[in-house]
Image (tube, rainbow, N blue to C red):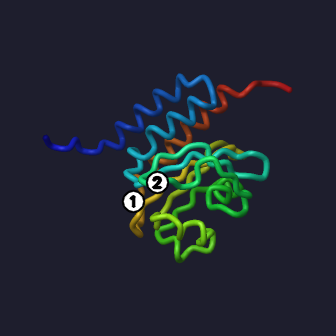
Amino acid sequence: MAERPLDSDAGLVRASCRLATARFLEDIVTILRETAREIAGSDGIAVVLREGDASFYAAEDAIEPLWRGRRFPLTDCVSGRAMLDGATIVVPDIECDPRVPIAAYRLTSMRSLVVVPIGSPEPVAALSAYWCASVIPDDGTVRRLEGLARHAAAALDRIRPSGP
């Protein structure tokens, strides 16, 4: 049986529809975990939540365990940096980027990554996609991840309680 070709754009549409009806934070995290890897065509993804001055690795879908359940200071991880800066970070080679805590990554097979912040003006989460090879993710991949992050941000805004 032939393998079904990857349709990342269709995956983004499906994910955005699911996020539009999400009612709880756990639902949003689950949707991101279940869809982001297909959308990015990556070897792994992590959903990272901002908890004060820490990054909490809430969920992942990867070929090997990464950091699920762990917390790191925002300033000590790439996902935290993306949240603090409010900007997408593309790292084609972890060995060549000073923002990467190289000791933690050397324990994994991950060699390239893209991290997109979720939420604006102050990001409350991040979505990280990882590859085992040193690659430069194409513009379409980065745009799809950023689009997924925008849909997740809208879902988070919708479920947040309003007022004091």
Q: Nearest the camera: 12 or 98?
A: 98
Report how many numbered discs are placed on residues in the image: 2
Q: For residue 11, which quarter of the picture?
A: top left
The percent coordinates of residue 32 (x first, y second) are: 51, 39
Q: Residue furthest right?
A: 164
In the image, is 71 to the left or to the right of 2?
A: right
Tag shown at residue 142: 2
In the image, is 109 to the left or to the right of 23?
A: left
The percent coordinates of residue 132 (x first, y second) are: 41, 63
**What amino acid type should be assigned to the residue bearing mark 1?**
Asp
**What amino acid type should be assigned to the residue bearing mark 2?**
Val
The percent coordinates of residue 50 (x first, y second) are: 70, 46
How crowded is the residue under tag 1: few (<14 C-alpha within 10 Å), some, or many (20+)?
A: few
Residue 108 vertical position relative to residue 15 in the rendered view, above or below: below
Q: Residue furthest left?
A: 1
- In space, the residues marked 2 and 1 are separated at their CA atoms by 7 Å
Q: Which residue is mark 1?
A: 138
Do the residues bearing badges 2 and 1 touch, measured as CB atoms within 8 Å? yes
Q: What residue lies at 79% left-to-right and 47% top-to-bottom? A: 52
The N terminus: image quadrant: top left
Tag shown at residue 67: none
Q: Nearest the camera: 155 or 58?
A: 58
Q: In terms of secondary structure, where does tag 2 sit?
A: helix
Residue 40 vertical position relative to residue 28 in the rendered view, above or below: below
How crowded is the residue under tag 2: few (<14 C-alpha within 10 Å), some, or many (20+)?
A: many
